[in-house]
Amino acid sequence: MKNFLKGLVDIKHWKKKTKITWVIVLIVIAACIVLSFLKPSEADMKAMASPEMQEMIKADESSSRKRVTVTYNSLIIVNYCSFSTSGAKEITERYVGFVGKAFQADEGFGKFAGQMVNYTYRMLGCGENILHGAKLTLFLTTASTLIGVILGTLLALGKISKNKILSKACSAYIFFFRGTPLMIQLFVIYYTLPAVFGFAWRDLFSAADTQAVYKGAFIAALIAYGLNSGAYCAEIVRAAIQSIEKGQHEAAKALGLSYSKTMRLIIIPQSVRRMVPPICNEFIMMLKDASLVFAISLMDITTISKNIMTSEISYIVFLPALVIYLIITAFFTWIFNAIEKKFSLYE
């Protein structure tokens, strides 16, 4: 009775915390929506250019040779616009728009804020396809973990199987992928396999596809990460299954259930609850390991950061990269904590 009452108190406390969290999230979303309407428009930002810059922009409209490069980036509540000229006379002007006003961003804090907006915009892959920035990182992590859970379940069942050949084969697979570095596995799949079997990953797509190289690299990365995740998820699933009391097996056998039905109807449904926390942790680890794709030039957050640093010689580019990873990790950690509480509520 005491445990039951304690459980009710815990449930009420958890629901109260959840409500408070949702209220905070809704307030933040509402504030972002309001601020997004208040930020200056693209036309307003471009109108901030100096008279000299405006004249050069107009001259470019009637000339085949462009002297002015205009960059406009818009992030939810803030936007950034820069003008740069090429040739004998180089001029650079930068502006940050926020709460209905545009501020000069050529020096000091304004320059820092402008760089943060510009770098964050590029790393998030805004205006680009799925194979850019944060979108690639999230897509690769999610797809790899899903493949890992499905493959890991099959490998775990194979490892604990009474068939010795199947058990040894699954154990060897798990040992290999857990015992070798993920980056080396990525190199083998992306470089070694094409060299041995005489093909190129980009050949999987049309020769006219300008993104064929990146799409091919993504497929190779997805295979490497999926196979690696499968080995780790296999041990998670195996441990969860074997943690179920043997009495459950004996009771199912007494009822006349076959091994497959026992696993499918009794053991696996009970073990799912115990798999959730470590699988969520595997997702977070895979999210951070996704940064290794810079080694095959896939345009994730890390690769874009490195390219910006090289081209613009700006080491502060790694600050927004750090913050983006932290925000993504915090978001999924919050979701997974809610899932774990949901599954462990009545334990």
Image: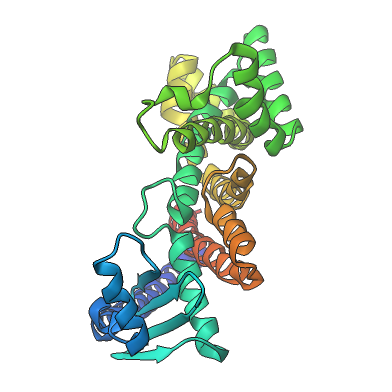
Asked if residue 248 shows in the view, the reply is no
Give the image location of residue 123, x and y in percent: 49, 61
Identify the residue at horizontal 67%, vertical 9% (top origin). 164
Front in this rendered view, residue 51 or 74 = 51
Question: Vertical placement of 42 versus 275: above or below?
Answer: below
Direction from residue 344 to residue 33 in the image, left or right: left
Direction from residue 165 to residue 261 in the image, left or right: left
Q: Quadrant of residue 242?
A: top right
Asked if residue 259 shows in the view, the reply is yes
Give the image location of residue 247, x and y in percent: 57, 29
Q: Quadrant of residue 170?
A: top right
Front in this rendered view, residue 179 or 137 = 137
The mark total stands at: 0
Identify the residue at horizontal 48%, vertical 80% (top origin). 91
Front in this rendered view, residue 158 or 67 = 67
Question: Vertical placement of 189 versus 315: above or below?
Answer: above
Direction from residue 276 to residue 55 in the image, left or right: left
Front in this rendered view, residue 84 or 4 = 84
Identify the residue at horizontal 52%, vertical 47% (top origin). 276
Question: Vertical placement of 323 versus 136: above or below?
Answer: below
Model colouring: rainbow
Give the image location of residue 294, x and y in percent: 61, 47
